Amino acid sequence: MLSSASPARAAGRVLAGAAAAGGALLAYGSLVERRAYTVREVTVPVLPAGAASLRVLHLSDLHLAPWQHDRVAWVRGLARLHPDLVIDTGDNFGHVDALPAILEALGPLLALPGGFVYGSNDYFTPLPKNPLAYLLHTSRVERERPDIDTAALTYRLVEAGWHRLDNRSAVVTVHGLRIGLVGTGDAHLREDAPRTLRRNLTSLPADVDLVLGVTHAPYRRVLDGFASMGANLVLAGHTHGGQVRVPGVGALTANCDLPPALARGLHVWRWRDRRMPLNVSAGVGTSIYAPIRFACRPEVTLLTLVPRQDAAR
């Protein structure tokens, strides 16, 4: 005969098992997967007929802190991929004193043509917060005065030859291809400027071979703006790929109004009758106050751009 204490003991064992499993998953996500850096490779047919392929390295969300030497070394090693162009979609800082680490990480890549935009963490240091709050609403920046020395990073990147693209545009020539780079300010801070975006897109020289959009946070209004004006490809970050994904389900949030199903990877953004490739990077880092990833490895993307199929006919 079972004693009356048996159900209580059984429930205790179930709870203990669940706690142990949760602890194991937390340890895996914070100690293992968070450092399982990955290069995701994709091919995108967006170039005109006869053009040579172009390798674009898309970096995002480094969230570097001074003590993260393994992340610095891994990013430095990306030069071995021999990209032709480097695009950084922001949130480089993870700590107020991270500038030396950022410059060390990017060092070999700064010898290549490049462009960049900033995210909110390039202006404001992260604050402790409940990471589960991201599942209820998008994150908020409630401070008005930046505490990051953004100007120092800008100076070093521009001095190296990279183009700042926050609500700006530039034209670079790589392997004979003229590429129009058009960026926005961080839409998460509402620093995107739709009228400026339209003006920058329409003022590009008529002889550019590719229009590449660059933005940190892939809000719908920004993507619609790029698509409506004929951008050929957009690169974005910010989402961390959902950061903690449920196997078989995927991301539960994109931390913006982008559908969670598009929180990482190469997709097609549709605006009326137009179709525009969109690459959303899951990023390399996390906030120092939420140092965990699950079913969502830290990544950069190496995009090989090739001629469009219709252009080859």
Image (tube, helix red, strand yellow):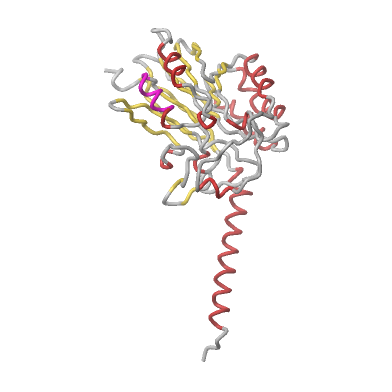
| Part of the protein shown in magenta | 222-230
- Front residue of 198/49: it is 198
Q: Is residue 68 above or below residue 32?
A: above
Q: Quadrant of residue 69?
A: top right
Residue drawn at the location 55% of the way across and 26% of the way down: 88
Residue drawn at the location 53% of the way across and 19% of the way down: 165
> Is 139 a magenta residue?
no
Q: Residue farthest to the bottom? A: 1
- Front residue of 288/77: it is 288
Q: Is residue 190 above or below residue 246?
A: above
Q: Is residue 33 above or below residue 7?
A: above
Q: Position of residue 64 (x, y in %)?
A: 66, 34
Q: Position of residue 309 (x, y in %)?
A: 30, 22
Q: Position of residue 147 (x, y in %)?
A: 69, 29
Q: Quadrant of residue 3?
A: bottom right
Residue drawn at the location 64% of the way across and 32% of the way down: 124
Question: In the rendered picture of this protein, how many numbered marks are placed on residues?
Answer: 0
Q: Is residue 67 left or right of residue 210?
A: right
> Is 227 a magenta residue?
yes
Prevailing SS of the magenta stretch: helix
Q: Position of residue 94 (x, y in %)?
A: 65, 35
- Front residue of 300/156: it is 156
Q: Is residue 270 above or below residue 54?
A: below
